[in-house]
Amino acid sequence: METDVPDLERNHLHWFRKDLRLHDNPALLKCLENCENFYGVYILDTEAWLHLKTNSSSTIWRFILQCLNELNDKLRNFNSRLFVVQGSPLRVLPTLFEKWKVSRLTFNTACDLYSKGREDVVFSLASIANVEVITQTSHTLFEIERYIEGNGGNVPINLEEFQHVFSSLGQPLPPVECVEARHFANCATPNSDWLEANFGIPTLEDLEFVDMSNISTTSLMNGGEDEGLGHFKNFVEEITRYDEGKKSQSPRESSRLSPYFKFGCLSVRYVCHEVQRYISKRDVISGFLKGLETRDFFIMLASRIRNWDRINGNPVCLDIPWEENSEYLKQFRQGKTGFPWIDANIAKLKQEGWITYEARQSLAYFLTRGCLWISWEEGVKVRDRSLFMAGVGAEEKV
């Protein structure tokens, strides 16, 4: 098999995960230090998706592929590129270590238990291949361990307890500098026709396991770092114009940033740092910051409580005698309950892949305690199929 890889030292590989951006990407900066040959890799874990989410919405995958294409375009501006590989990271990375003679692997750590367990295996695989590993934290305001250490070594289970710990930690670290052309000045990205043909970004049609029946061409949520930064800028400008008396109506309460936090197109630390300048402008800004704090709370719980996203084996989940009504559940999934607000939000969710925090709460209450008394696990299935920020610990009030 042709690889066209030069036999040089300092071949560095950055594993893009939930950090599909150039701003505030500490692990990427570490990868570019003392680097001669740079490989930016995104692994489409198709094995996991085939096993867990066989009916994944095309709207979600459209968003992901937009993120990858934009990141690839930005890297090409630096005479580099994004290498996309399909398969399990535990199979892909050892192969790349050998073929590209990788000497350093960098990545930003994940928080959920599944990913943390996989990271431990990656460390072992890298050690066997004599590859240096450097990891950083960038998906939360603080490292998860600091919340636990601040609570005497115990996981703060309730929100009030967590908020007390959060307030004792001071301000989050400021974002690191944005990756620019100068960071690539002394390194190159090997390329060839073979690499172009075998490590390109797939199309939706290439991903045969994606459900194409409800593909949306009208979604307001397009993937990518620039899109996320644009939504953040619009949110802040709207609040500022309102406070300056240039708008008669109230500003929207939702920032629409949660999908961009989910996939790492937008850094939560960057947003927190930038929005501090407006904290005295309006109550909604204070509420927004509280939402970022609450986001860390749920991510922390998902990182420490086993089976967080299910009932069986979940040590903090109440044993509730849920009803089983297949017909009601079918009507809920199809958005045909007869309740206009509920049905409209289900339709919007399927079409655009995103609804506001208030709308998500409405659906959750309706499904569980409000009317149907059906298990929240069924709601998780609806969420995972269509919602951009689906995943444990992703209840962001943003």
Image (tube, rainbow, N blue to C red):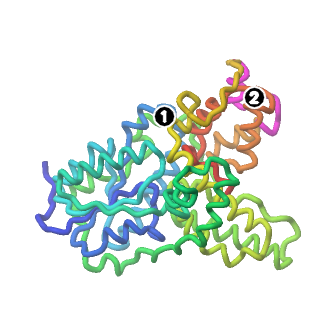
Is 89 rendered above or below residue 72?
A: above
Q: Amino acid at mark 1?
A: Lys
Q: Which residue is mark 2?
A: 336
Nearer the observer, 109 or 253: 109
Q: CA distance from mark 1 to mark 2?
A: 24 Å
Q: Residue furthest right?
A: 248
The x, y position of residue 68, in whole percent, is 43, 56
Task: Tell me the quarter of the picture where residue 318 sits.
Answer: top right
Is 320 rendered above or below residue 6?
A: above
Q: Is residue 117 left or right of residue 381?
A: left
Q: Amino acid at mark 2?
A: Lys
Query: For the residue labelled by badge 2, is the local secondary structure a helix, a strand or a loop?
Result: loop
Q: Residue at x 65, y 33 (%)?
A: 379
Q: Which residue is mark 1?
A: 53
- Magenta stretch, main secondary structure, is helix
Task: Tell me the quarter of the picture where residue 282 sits.
Answer: bottom right
Task: Answer whether residue 330 is magenta in the image.
Answer: yes
Q: Is residue 271 left or right of residue 201?
A: right
Q: Which mark is residue 184?
A: none
Total number of numbered discs in the rendering: 2
Q: Residue at x 44, y 67 (%)?
A: 25
Q: Which residues are magenta?
A: 327-342
Residue 224 visible to an observer of this rendering: no
